[in-house]
Image (cartoon, rainbow, N blue to C red):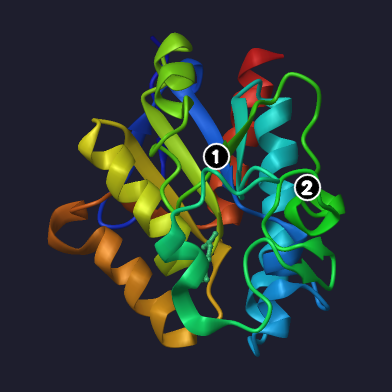
Amino acid sequence: MATHTFPAEPYPLEFDPESTALLVIDMQRDFVNPGGFGEMLGNDVTPLRSTVEPTRRVLEAARAAGLFVIYTREGHRPDLADAPPTKLARGHLACGIGDQGPMGRVLVRGEYGHDIVDELQPQEGEPIIDKPGKGSFYATDLELILRNRGIKTLIITGVTTEVCVHTTVREANDRGFECIVLEDCVGSYFPEFQEMGLRMIKAQGGIFGWVSNSSDVVSVLQRLEKVAA
Ligand code: TIU
């Protein structure tokens, strides 16, 4: 086992590239892109858009270093049979889940807005987990796939910080995975939730995991590449 270290808070995180995966959470057009569902709800998507370029650099470095890369998307079957009625009703939205939105039916699998943004499209062999909830482990085969690959450490990117990222990190932590969340690769519509969401993860000695950033992690991954070459 080759042990390496990521600079992180509250302290450096040891990892083995063989058992480390990059998880890209819900970088879907409807959440991230101007003109999508998120913006239609009155949110400013700028902080989410700003995660795309750093995440692209992390993806590139992770792929070059041979790390396992895996994606999630939040969404539902076209018949909405997997959407809890409570989720469909929440917010009393004029245009909500399953309705015709600016980029197709909102959060419905197969629609343009439901898919991953162009800049971060998955490559062949990188699984996409379609999840009906906020957490990536609930009602999905993510845990099975990670265990089958012997994954122990998750590099976490995606949106939104306090919703799907937090829920996923908490689920992963309870299952014994070690999560390192990259602060410039996760985004929230609310600056105060971004700050507190990250502080909550690393508080109390890393109660849910670690926090780092794209440039520190990319530097470490690039050095791995040289070791492997
Ligand atoms: N992926 C994810 O975070 N889904 C959300 O609905 N997030 C919101 O912040 N609304």
Q: In the displayed image of the protein, which residue is found farthest to the left?
A: 204
Mark carried by residue 23: 1
Circles 2 and 1 in contact, beta carbons < 8 Å: no
| Residue in the image at 75% along x and 38% along y | 60
Q: Position of residue 45 (x, y in %)?
A: 69, 79
Estimate the x, y position of residue 105 in percent, counting from the top left.
Answer: 77, 61
- Residue 160 percent location from the top left of the image: 52, 65
Numbered disc total:
2
Q: Is residue 118 visible?
A: yes
Give the Cα separation between the discs numbered 2 and 1: 12 Å
Q: Quadrant of the N terminus?
A: top left
**Which is more toward the observer, 29 or 54?**
29
Residue 53 at least partly seen:
no
Q: Dot 2, crowdedness within 10 Å: few (<14), some or many (≥20)?
A: some
The image quarter containing residue 86 is: bottom left
| Dot 1: element | strand
Q: Residue at x 46, y 57 (%)?
A: 164
Q: Give the amino acid type for the residue marked by disc 2 in the picture.
A: Leu
Q: Which quadrant does the C terminus fall into?
A: top right
Disc sitting over residue 120 in the figure? 2
**Crowd band around label 1 with a 10 angstrom C-alpha radius: few (<14), some (14–19), many (20+):** many
Is 110 positioned to the left or the right of 11 in the image? right
Q: Closest to the observer: 101 or 66?
A: 101
Residue 112 appears in which quarter of the rendering? bottom right
Residue 83: give x, y in percent of width and height. 51, 51
Q: Tag 1 or tag 2, which sits nearer the N-term?
A: 1
Q: Residue at x 55, y 44 (%)?
A: 81
